[in-house]
Amino acid sequence: MTVHPSLQPYADAWTHSIEAISELVGPLVEGEWNRATPCPGWSVRDIVSHIIGVECEQLGDPRPIHTLPRDLYHVKTEHQRYMEMQVDVRRHHTGPEMTADLEYTIIRRARQLRNENRQPETKVRAPLGAETTLELALRMRAFDVWVHEQDLRTVLHAPGNLDSPGAHVARDNFLAVLPKVVAKDAGAPPNSAIVFDIHGPVEFMRTVRVDAEGRGTIDGTPSLGPLATIVMDWETYFRLATGRVRAAAVADRIKAEGDQELVAAILREFAVTP
């Protein structure tokens, strides 16, 4: 059986990141599993639980029958409640139980991906009873696992993989929604252009152009007269885009020229993950 060529990059990125996570958490002592992470309300254990739970659902496993406590301050939406179920059910698991569960889940999912012969447009299970395409599901798993790998690296003081295959999947995901952030969410004026100049392990320059009807598009051609130019490093970019930090906390790592009110509006709307 052969994995479809459009799916293979996502399978490779997922494999790279989830194996890195396994290596990160394998040596942890019990207390380290309780360290707080950049995800509100989630510890190291909770992030690993989330990853295990979502991968199990991708395997077709039934969701756990579990009642959430009423005092989880960070759970406010139906989507958060859905995700929290797989997390809370493992909150009392020990470190060895967590690593064994993670390793077994990786083995099962890796086998599933190796034998994957469905077409990219095949409909598969998505959160809250929805459906999505297999290609989008794999892309989002590669993205999610890489972002959480970086969450764990932050709290465990183990930087790395900022330019891994998962990082490039994340870049593409962020760029796909950047026109909406600029044109709709931040309200950039019609017939304007905003340049993003990102340096570091993942380097790129993109221009978001807003047409006369207020619709945004993105391309790699520099604008000769942009309304604003925003310069930052890749790590700052993805931490802003995932809501892990706010612009005020990393102001020294952002350089902006042009319309400062528009820049502030863009940075205020920059987080695009739930």
Image (cartoon, grey):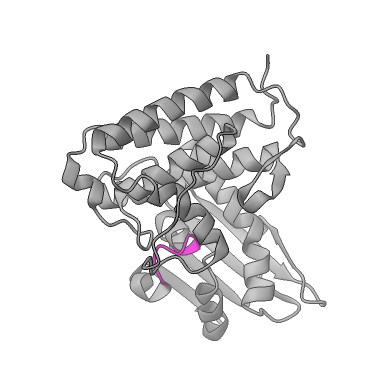
Count of all numbered marks drawn on residues in the image? 0
Residue 168 sits above or below residue 85 on the image: above
User: Is 18 or 213 nearer to us in this picture?
Assistant: 18
Query: Is residue 97 positioned above or below 110 on the image?
Result: below
**Is 248 on the left or on the right of 259, as rendered?**
left
Q: Is residue 88 left or right of residue 141?
A: left
Q: Quadrant of the N terminus?
A: top right
Taking the spot 50% from the left edge, 53% from the top edge, the residue there is: 83
Quarter where residue 113 is shown: top right
Check residue 69 for magenta coloring: no
Name the residue rendered at 53%, 68% in the picture. 270
Q: Position of residue 49 (x, y in %)?
A: 39, 44
Name the residue rendered at 64%, 60% in the picture.
177
Farthest right residue in view = 213
Most distant residue in the top direction: 1
Q: Is residue 22 left or right of residue 15?
A: left
Q: Position of residue 94 (x, y in %)?
A: 25, 39
Decide if residue 222 is in sight here.
Answer: no
Nearest the eye: 171 or 274: 274
Quick check: can you spot residue 74?
yes
Which residue is more in the foreground, 39 or 20?
39
Q: Main secondary structure of the magenta part?
A: loop
Magenta highlight range? 240-246
Q: Image height check: is 168 above or below 104?
A: below
Residue 153 rendering spot, x and y as whole percentages: 31, 46
- Answer left or right for 142 relative to 201: right
**Residue 103's x, y, as percent?**
38, 27
| Residue 215 position by quadrant | bottom right
